[in-house]
Image: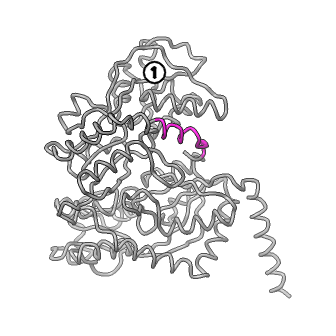
Amino acid sequence: MKKLFRLFAILFLAVTILTSCSDKKGKPLIVACAVSTSPYCYYVGDANTTVAGIDIDLINEIGKELGRPIQIRIVPFQYIFTLISQGEADIGAAGITITPEHSEDNLISSPYDTSSQVIVVPNGAAIKDESALKTARVAVQEGASDIELLRETVKPEAVIPFLTLEEIDTVFNRRRADAAVLDAMQADSLIKANKSKYKILGKPLSRLQYGLVFNKEDSRLAAAANKVIETFKVSGALQKSRAKHFDELNNIPPARRNEDKGKPFVVCLESSFAPFVLMNRNQLVGMDIEIAKDIAKELKRPLRIKIVPFHEVLPLVESGSADMGASGISITPEREKLVLFSQPYESTVRRILVNTDAAYAKLDDLKGKVIGAKRGTKSEDFAIEELQAEKTVHFDNSMQGILGLLEHKIDAYIDDGGEADLASDKIASIDGRRVKKLDVSIPLEEYGFAFQLGNTDAKAAADKVIDTKRHRGEINALSRKYTSIYMTLDMENL
């Protein structure tokens, strides 16, 4: 009798959870994840523009159970928790460890997978055991809980953050690190892909459990996800997913191991800068993506996309960690000292937006105010140098910046004209809220693709592709195409 009562109680709870979530049925489930956490979340495909992984398999099952389509939002790992806490994403994923710190400000699901953290060193390394890490430089994924674990317990000489698994090979080759701490599956993939160039040292450092992250106010979604997680594990779907992605990852050649002309053409860019780059559902698209594909084809090299914050694009190109930088990079004399630019393929004006009820009319009115901009852009430079901003507030994209302006978090927002206009129109079309443009004259700027100094072959290929597309009218056609796609997306899908 007690067993029967318990069964009815479980069924009642399941029905209650699903009923409580039914009011959101059909509404996109926004998932913030980092593609640097294979096998949990990573890119697949010839150009690495489709998101896959264990977390994606699980989230797709949650979406099916709730009757909600999945909308993937790619962000750096450390930004996931910010988006969740601000209510800008429903679920955070990417092999997130369940820790007291992560649970303090968020809801964490029940564990869907477990793994161990292991030490990886190059074959022949002087490091023989964990104790040697105290005098070593150790690479750990930026934003991961392992950084704090190392600093508090192992206390190495230095902790070197990296963004993606592919960068570890570069870190070791340049002798920036003596060892790396990785998830066991990541370590297995690295070793297999690099023909046993590396090895796992000694016993695991720790045993970890992974979970999904939710906003503290969204207990219903967390409870519904936990129900799916249980089925995902019990049915054997987790084991199948692990095996599938391990095999898939080990069939992908690493970006910098192939030294012939078929070596991947690595393009780093920001993922939210319409119409140049944007996410349409879980696919990365845009005019820069289209042009980059043709440049790679001209060079007879497979394309590899790397998503990074905008302020990291030029440093990666300058150091040779990426072949090309994209996503609307303004050509300036200062930047031309650091990188080689293609010929311009698009131009823009700088736009300053303020609230419709603001009394600002000229640039001098904004001096000493709080200005919003994207980090590392010419807009941020303008705010600091020309407007002498009291403070600059960083946003990931124009949509977030304009919403921050409407919420009076800043006095003005500066961005490239096309992107700012698109985002303004998008917000106005959805909920009627409007901002106004400050009627000031700011010089025209031109966009180009960036290459490492001396990489004249890649520049020549880019110039040839740009010339061809311009003469055929394809540059303008691409701009119209992806502007149209951007304007059809719901705000929640951006």
335 relative to 312 in the view: left or right: left
203 relative to 1 in the view: left or right: left
Q: Where is residue 105? Give x, y as percent.
A: 56, 54
- Of the pair 480 and 145, the residue shown nearer to us: 480
Q: Is residue 490 magenta?
A: yes
Query: From the image, which quarter does the C terminus lie in?
Result: top right
Overall secondary structure of the magenta section:
helix
Residue, far bottom: 1
Q: Secondary structure at mark 1?
A: loop
- Check disc 1 and report the residue beneath it: 369
Q: Residues within 10 Å of mark 1 (few under 14, many from 20)?
A: some
For residue 262, what is the image quadrant?
A: bottom left
Q: Is residue 89 magenta?
A: no
**Magenta-highlighted residues:** 480-492
Query: Considering only vertical position in the picture, is 147 above or below 337?
Result: below
Q: Where is residue 95? Give x, y as percent.
A: 47, 65
Residue, far front: 472
For residue 257, what is the image quadrant?
A: bottom left
Query: Considering only vertical position in the picture, is 125 above or below 136?
Result: below
Q: Where is residue 484? Give x, y as percent.
A: 53, 38
